[in-house]
Image (spheres, rainbow, N blue to C red):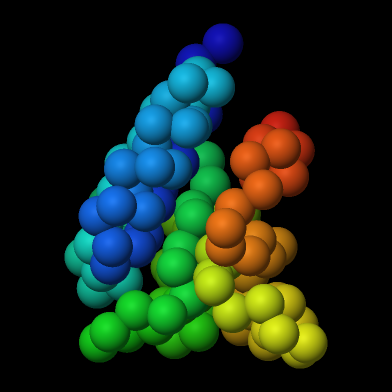
Amino acid sequence: MPKKRILIIDDDSRNIFALTATLKAKSFECLSCLSAREALELLKTDVVIDAILIDMMMPDMDGYEAIPRIKSLANRENTPIFSVTAQAMVGDREKCLRAGATEYIAKPIDVDRLLHLLSGI
């Protein structure tokens, strides 16, 4: 069975490094982008992406703007998108889901919960 490929979109390379190390240890393949604009260009191609982890607070284009744009791409409308954010206030999960996220994960990331969510892809 081929490894599932996860796209990590985050403007902080330390977060990308930590998520990539964690996911690779669990047999996922990872790609990363440092901006939503870079990710949108990648997602317009035919590259296989099984799920997306997106930071919601990025300069230039945040996750709230990027998720609907990703979902509007014909080849990505059904790709699971998990919002990853340090915002863990009441209503933040709902705001992410309204933007089109499949689910919400607060930072610091609960690895067991993340792996549980990714097991469904």
Residue drawn at (49%, 55%) of the image: 53
Quarter of the image with the N terminus in it: top right
Q: Is residue 1 left or right of residue 17?
A: right
| Residue 57, percent from left and from top | 42, 80
Quarter of the image with the C terminus in it: top right
Residue furthest out toward the front: 108
Foreground of the two, 25 or 32: 25
Examine the image and state in which quarter residue 30 appears: top left
Q: Is residue 32 left or right of residue 49?
A: left
Q: Is residue 98 visible?
A: no
Tell me if residue 108 comes above or below residue 30 in the rendering.
below
Examine the image and state in which quarter residue 73 appears: bottom left
Foreground of the two, 75 or 20: 20
Please count the marks in the image.
0
Residue drawn at (40%, 48%) of the image: 7
Tell me if residue 113 comes above or below residue 56 in the rendering.
above
Foreground of the two, 118 or 42: 118
Residue furthest out toward the top: 1
| Residue 82, percent from left and from top | 59, 59
Residue drawn at (25%, 87%) of the image: 60
Tell me if residue 51 comes above or below residue 23 in the rendering.
below
| Residue 4, percent from left and from top | 51, 29
Q: Is residue 83 visible?
A: yes
Tell me if residue 119 comes above or below residue 18 in the rendering.
above
Residue drawn at (48%, 76%) of the image: 56
Foreground of the two, 40 or 113: 113
